[in-house]
Image (cartoon, rainbow, N blue to C red):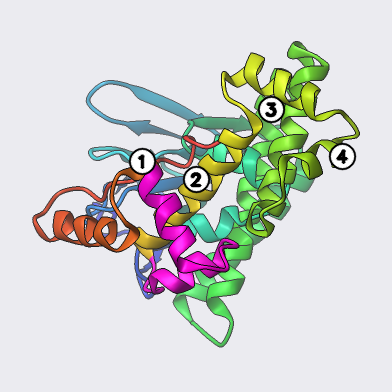
Amino acid sequence: MPLDSQNDAHTTSVMPHLRAERIQCGLRDKVLGMASNSQEKHWQAILLTTGTGSIDNEEESIPLEAPCLAWLPGRIGRSLKIRAGGVGYHFSIGEEALAGAIGNNPESTDLRFLVDRRVIADLLDDEVTISDAAHAFDLVVRELHRPRNGSWNMIIAQIRSVLVFLWRQSGVEEVALSSRGESSRILQRFRQLLEMHFRERWPVGDYADALQITHDRLHDICRRELGKTPLQLVHERLLHEARLRLERSVMTVEQVASSIGFRDVGHFSRFFKSKVGVPPARYRDSVARSIREGNKRPGSSFADWP
């Protein structure tokens, strides 16, 4: 929470693991704590439309100068300082909301790569992005402050918009692809297709057909670029999704199996045990027990796959 007793930022925590605020500093600097009381990891987004500030911890101070858009993976001990006259927005988001915002579509692979990396994007001379991003942040604040039917979906959509703005501004994927040639572009397209179709249990041949290349070429590219076969990547994506749903949802094991394309829960259980070493139900119990004992929630980061 802001440390300034005269703070006029509007803050709310109507929905769990999600906080948003409008920042208007007036004549005094403001310092906003960015740590969370929850054990769950949080991510931070900042839009500064006027003024200057910094993101500080014991190790470093990251300067901010408007107009800019910033994204930071969760970390305890950070604070956001906005100097007098500064105007902008800030939100803090937990894993459940972030997973919803990332979604499952061709761009999700890029967003998943992005969210566990620090991005500070200069928006100078980009009035359209400044206006659109401010609108997205403002809607998050308003929908949190006055929840209505559909507020959660509205908020998730706006957070997704902010992620897309960051993705466009960062240029990380474009640089990587342009520098590594055709094989990397094919691999990226494979990852996007896999994101869309892994629940349909496409065989590897269907991915190769959609890419208009042979099965052998897809196999060679995956082995050369990632050291894994296409089938291993398909299985890793299925396993990643299964673990997330077992850890963070109230779905039954049968529902989890069905949601990722397994028609038979026995087949799903054998697949899961072969990869993790324990059946799905026992894995879920071990996660719940670990959390009750005060340990951090296990699981992969958003950048771990693909």
Where residue 79 appears, as percent x and y from the top left, is 30, 40
Eye-nearest disc, 3 or 1: 3
Mark 3 or mark 1, which has the lower sequence index? 1
Amino acid type at circle 1 is Leu
Mark number for residue 80? 1
Amino acid type at circle 4 is Asp
Mark 4 or mark 1, which has the lower sequence index? 1
Q: Which residues are magenta?
A: 249-274
Mark 2 or mark 1, which has the lower sequence index? 2
**Residue 94 in view in this figure:** no
Amino acid type at circle 3 is Glu
Q: Residue at x 81, y 36 (%)?
A: 208
Where residue 126 appears, as percent x and y from the top left, is 76, 38
Distance between mark 3 and mark 1 Cα atoms: 28 Å
Label 2, on which residue? 46
Tell me the element at label 3.
helix
Amino acid type at circle 2 is Ile
Label 4, on which residue? 209
Mark 2 or mark 3, which has the lower sequence index? 2
Eye-nearest disc, 4 or 1: 4
Label 3, on which residue? 173
The quadrant the C terminus occupies is top right
Where residue 119 appears, as percent x and y from the top left, is 54, 31
Asked if the stretch drawn in magenta spans residue 123, the answer is no
Eye-nearest disc, 2 or 3: 3
Distance between mark 4 and mark 2 Cα atoms: 42 Å
